[in-house]
Image: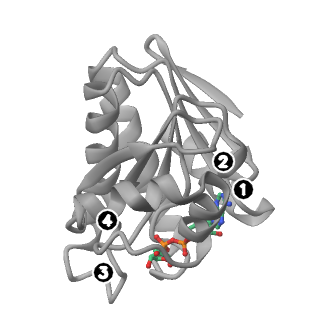
Amino acid sequence: MEKKIGSAALSLIKGDITHEETDAIVNAANSRLAGGGGVDGAIHRAGGPKIMEECRKIGGCPTGSAVITTGGNLKAKYVIHTVGPIYHDGKHNEAKLLSSAYKSSLEIAVKNGIKSLAFPSISTGAYGYPINEAAEIALKTVMDFIRADKGLSLVRFVLFSDQDFEVYKKALEKLTK
Ligand code: AR6
């Protein structure tokens, strides 16, 4: 599924983000940049040790922020590591921090001349963010950004399951009605 937003495309696909050929892919990291399971584990496995070497040098990344490293052996030239919030009850600034994780990733992409970028569904795995709410925040943040900033030509969400894809598809239909 794809929507034109100004001069950019916003696309949703089901797949494995480590196969993406966008200029950069985004990692759902932890604040120590220590690696882990889920998409973080998959990206480090596929991208090789150069990514972790750079993460170690950077040292960490506060929740809601983003840092950038090489893409190592990935097709993507860069990995942008962002840290989404751990979901408690929705009353701990989770929505703002999740939106900030997406926005910081988009900002660091533009700063590095990146034109195409792929996101996973940040915080909706190990960090427990309810995906219906997270999808709306993710899509709205990206749409607002690409409407205002002309630097990016493609932002893609790579959803790992049919179910997650359907949730994002419904949310995008609702937001673009
Ligand atoms: N491609 C695309 N999406 C994927 C892939 C993949 N290869 N693998 C998993 N997902 P999670 P979080 C989906 O848990 O909730 C890590 O240990 C997955 O199905 O990866 O932000 C970090 O080190 C889910 O929908 O990230 C942190 O400690 C989504 O990616 C913590 O988990 C996010 O799930 C971050 O938790």
Crowding near pointer 2: few (<14 within 10 Å), some, many (20+)?
some
Q: CA distance from mark 1 to mark 4?
A: 36 Å
Of marks 4 and 3, the one in the foreground: 4
Name the spot of residue 114 as percent of width and height, x first: 41, 24
When the figure is inspected, residue 65 is found, relative to residue 71, above or below; the finding is below
Q: Which residue is at the far bottom?
A: 88
Q: CA distance from mark 4 to mark 2?
A: 36 Å
Q: Answer yes or no: disc 2 within 8 Å of ligand 1.
A: no
Q: Does the residue at mark 2 contact the one at mark 3 (Cβ under 8 Å)?
A: no
Where on the image, by quarter, is ligand 1? Answer: bottom right
Crowding near pointer 1: few (<14 within 10 Å), some, many (20+)?
some
Residue under the image location 39 percent in, 39 percent down: 142
Label 1: which secondary element: helix
Q: Which residue is at the far top?
A: 7
Q: Earlier in the sequence, mark 4 or mark 2?
A: 4
Residue under the image location 60 percent in, 52 percent down: 47
Residue under the image location 43 percent in, 51 percent down: 138
What amino acid type is highlighted by mark number 2?
A: Lys
Residue holding disc 1: 166
Q: CA distance from mark 2 to mark 3?
A: 23 Å
What amino acid type is highlighted by mark number 3?
A: Gly
Label 3: which secondary element: loop
Name the spot of residue 176 as percent of width and height, x first: 52, 33
Residue holding disc 2: 169
Of marks 4 and 2, the one in the foreground: 4
Residue holding disc 3: 90
Q: Is residue 58 visible?
A: yes
Residue holding disc 4: 56
Q: Is residue 82 visible?
A: no
**Would residue 20 appear left or right of 62 to someone viewing this image?**
right
Q: Earlier in the sequence, mark 1 or mark 3?
A: 3
